Amino acid sequence: MRPLRICLIASNRYPVRQPFAGGLESLTHQLAGQLVRRGHEVTLFAAPGSDPALPVAALDVQSIQFTSAALRDVHAPAEEWMADHHAYLSLMLDLSSTGSHRFDVVHNNSLHHLPVAMAAMLDVPVLTTLHTPPTPWLESAMRASTAPVECTAVSLCTAAAWRHVADATVVHNGVDLDHWQPGVGGRSAVWTGRLVAEKAPHVAIEAALLAGIPLVLAGPAPDTAYFAREIEPRLSGDVMYVGHLDHQRLAELVAQSAVAVVTPVWEEPFGLVAIEAMACGTPVAGLAHGALPEIVAAGTGALAAGDDPADLAAAIDQSLACDRGAVRQHAVHRFSAAQMVDGYEARYSEVIDIRSAA
């Protein structure tokens, strides 16, 4: 397709840089880089401190200073909430006045409601990617919009969850197959991601111990109370936490693991760690929540129907028999970064054509 001028809006909570705070930051980094390599002119609006190798324009997150009178308001939102609000309000007001001169399309890859609520003010088409189950603020923005909200969703289950307010085209997340390379495996299981309650690494620990396989955990631990209560007491010679790794070391760890354990106890919208593992040829043993049943196919791993560690231990045993070459090929055929960018380019063309015909 012809080169486009793309405004890519990221989440402002964490910088888009390694080591990534989560899957959303990793995905945004990859998408921005892939679009640039395809010849598009990308401006990434992201948190201060994002990777300078990307075409970043920092969101105005911290500059606002409230008056003492405003701060005395007993109903004032939390400081972090106001920082989010100010960042996206400033950006959308700027785009409403200058966006059509600077961009062909705006891709809202954030989790905030204002890019949706204010999209109708812009003279440039806006595409929003749905990364989460429905939230009250975003539902409100969609219901109040004076124009159809153009959306993609990262999975079929996420699209279905939003169907009452949005008709979303599915563009599955993808991984850089040159980075996540196949490996020979090893004797240990691996768990990667944010160590938080809804991702339940404690369930992975219990299951690995029942399966008799050592487990390595890697990722940020933002909820220190959860980590101290549920993870630290379970660390032992067979359960190791190696910290928050950059993507190079993380890819090496996953490729050298026998199985990746993925344990969402909520309706996980996608599960990027699962396709990262499969790209390395590492089969996935997980809990069948959210999008994992549409990601993990027969021969690439096994899913436990409930949250019982014993059932997950059985899934770990079953996954160990998977052919690593077949697991890698599943990721190549269904979840490459190239396929993801193809999908977004197609949607950019569609929303541009829709706006031109209006």
Image (cartoon, helix red, strand yellow):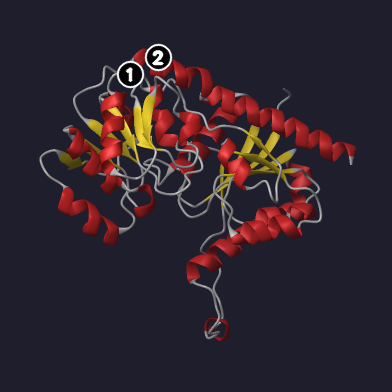
- Asked if residue 63 can be seen in this view, the reply is no
257 above or below 273? above
Residue 313: x and y, percent? 26, 35
Residue at 75 percent across and 60 percent down: it is: 144
- For label 2, the crowd category at 10 Å Cα-Cα, with few meaning under 14, some 14 to 19 and many 20 or more, is some
Nearest to the observer: residue 24 or residue 93: 24
Q: Which residue is mark 1?
A: 322
Dividing the image into 4 quarters, which one contains the N terminus? top right
- For label 1, the crowd category at 10 Å Cα-Cα, with few meaning under 14, some 14 to 19 and many 20 or more, is many
Quarter of image, res 150: top right
Three-letter code for the amino acid on which mark 1 is drawn: Cys
Q: Which residue is mark 2?
A: 326
Asked if marks 2 and 1 touch (Cβ < 8 Å), the reply is yes
Looking at the rendered structure, the number of numbered marks drawn on it comes to 2
Three-letter code for the amino acid on which mark 2 is drawn: Ala
Quarter of image, res 326: top left
